[in-house]
Amino acid sequence: MNLKRVLASLLSVTVSLTSARNTTDIDAPQAAGRSAETCGDPADALPFYRLLAGTGEYLYVADPTTVGTELRAAPNGWALQTVAALVFSTQEVSTVPFYTLHSNTGSEWLYVANTTELANALNNGYHLSTEPVVYIYPTQICGSVPFYYLNNAAEKSNFYTAVESERLDFIANEGYTDVDIAGYVLPLGYSQCA
C-alpha cells in the first residue's frame, strides 16, 4: 500500500470519527425537556462504532482509540462501517452495562445487557472482552430505540442495529434471523429524552 493511500485512509477515518463524535451537541432548551430522574444525559452519549471484518464478523466499540487501533492492526481485516447508535461510556441514570463477549473459538462477538444471558454466554464458550463496557437502557425509555440482535448461524456472525429497515434487509437478504432486542440505545441525531 503506498503512502498516498495510507494517508487517504487515515484522513477518511479521522473525518468519520470526528463527525460521529459531534452528533450529540444539544442546547439548554432541549436538555431541559429530559427527566434527570429517569434519563441519562444525552450530552454524555457517545457513538457506538460498527466495524466489519473481511470474515464477516462485526465488532462494536465506543472508544475511537480502539477503532483506530483495530484499523491499523489489520488494514485488510477490519473496516469502519458506520456509527450504529449512541451509548454511554459511564453508568447513567436508568442504564445497565452492555457487555462485550468474544467466543473462545475467536470468530464471534456477542453483546448482552442481561446478567442471565451473560452467565449463559460465559458457560457456553464465551469470555468477557477487554473492550470497555458501555451502558444502554434495559427498557424503551428516554427516547431510546430498540437495538436489534440478529444472528447468521451459518456464518457464526452476530449483527446489531437500531435501524428497522437495516434489520429487515439483513433478514431478507443476508441470511440473518431475529434473535431479540439486545437493549435500547439512543438513535443518531438524538437530542432530548421524550
Image (tube, grey):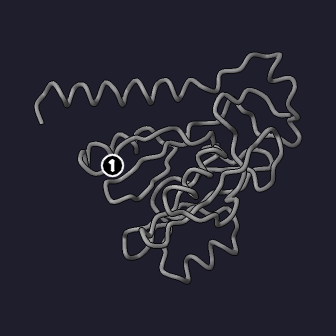
Write the residue at 66% across / 73% down: 117
Q: Position of residue 172 (x, y in %)?
A: 57, 56
At a point 45% along the width and 60% down the height, the residue shown is: 130
Determine the residue positioned at 45% across, 53% down: 59
Q: Is residue 50 left or right of residue 143?
A: left
Q: Give x and y (percent) for residue 67.
A: 40, 42
Determine whether, in the image, residue 65 is placed left or right of residue 98. Answer: left
Q: Secondary structure at mark 1?
A: strand
Which image quarter is the N terminus in? Answer: top left
The amino acid type, in three-letter code, at marker 1 is Trp
Decide: is 184 above or below 118.
above
The furthest residue to the left: 2
Work out whether 44 lies above or below 124: above
Q: Nearer the viewer, residue 73 or 1?
A: 1
**Quadrant in which the C terminus is drawn:** top right
When the figure is inspected, residue 34 is found, relative to residue 38, above or below; the finding is above
Name the residue carrying label 1.
78
In this view, the residue farthest toward the bottom is 123
The outermost residue toward the front is: 172
- Mark 1 surroundings: few (<14), some (14-19) or many (≥20) residues within 10 A: many
Nearer to the camera, 67 or 149: 149
Number of labels in the image equals 1
The foreground one among 132 and 190 is 190
In the rendered structure, the answer to whether residue 10 lies left or right of residue 35 reads left
Q: Residue at x 70, y 67 (%)?
A: 114
Image position, residue 144 (x, y; %): 76, 42
Quarter residue 85 falls in: top right
Residue 75, percent from left and from top = 24, 45
Measured along the vertical axis of the image, is residue 171 above or below residue 15? Answer: below
